[in-house]
Image: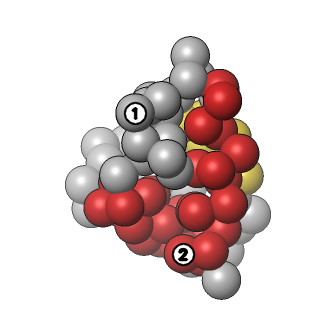
Amino acid sequence: MYLRLQRTSEEIDTGYAKSDLASWAKRARAFADGGVPADLVPLAPAAAQAKRDVFIYLISGAKVRAPAAAQALLGLLQ
């Protein structure tokens, strides 16, 4: 699973609000377990419900905050 997050904000030290990062961590876990997060609508029917790798890239106009956002998200996932 490849996720590309593009809404970092320069005004927030971690690029995203803590609640937003927590939501993405929860979604990443759901995807990793083979599911689909309840708050996202799939564009295609779900594939087999197998565990999978999840890669999250933080790419946006506020690139200066991307490393901090990645570190904060990793902290929530560990």
Q: Is residue 18 above or below residue 10?
A: below
Q: Is residue 12 above or below residue 21?
A: above
Left or right for 32, reference 37: right
Residue at 54 percent of width and 36 percent of height:
5
Q: In this orientation, does residue 35 appear?
A: no
Q: Position of residue 19 (x, y in %)?
A: 30, 61
Q: What residue is pinned by disc 1?
A: 11
The label nearer to you, 1 versus 2, is: 1
Task: Give the answer, above or below, for where 37 lies relative to 8.
Answer: below
Q: Earlier in the sequence, mark 1 or mark 2?
A: 1
Q: Toward the viewer: 68 or 21?
A: 68
Q: Secondary structure at mark 2?
A: helix
Residue 76 is tagged as 2
Secondary structure beneath label 1: loop
Residue at x 64% of width, y 38% of height:
66
Left or right relative to 50: residue 10: left
Residue at the location (64% across, 50% down)?
68
Task: For marks 1 and 2, give the CA distance.
Answer: 21 Å
Give the residue type at disc 2. Leu
Q: Which mark is residue 78?
A: none
The amino acid at mark 1 is Glu
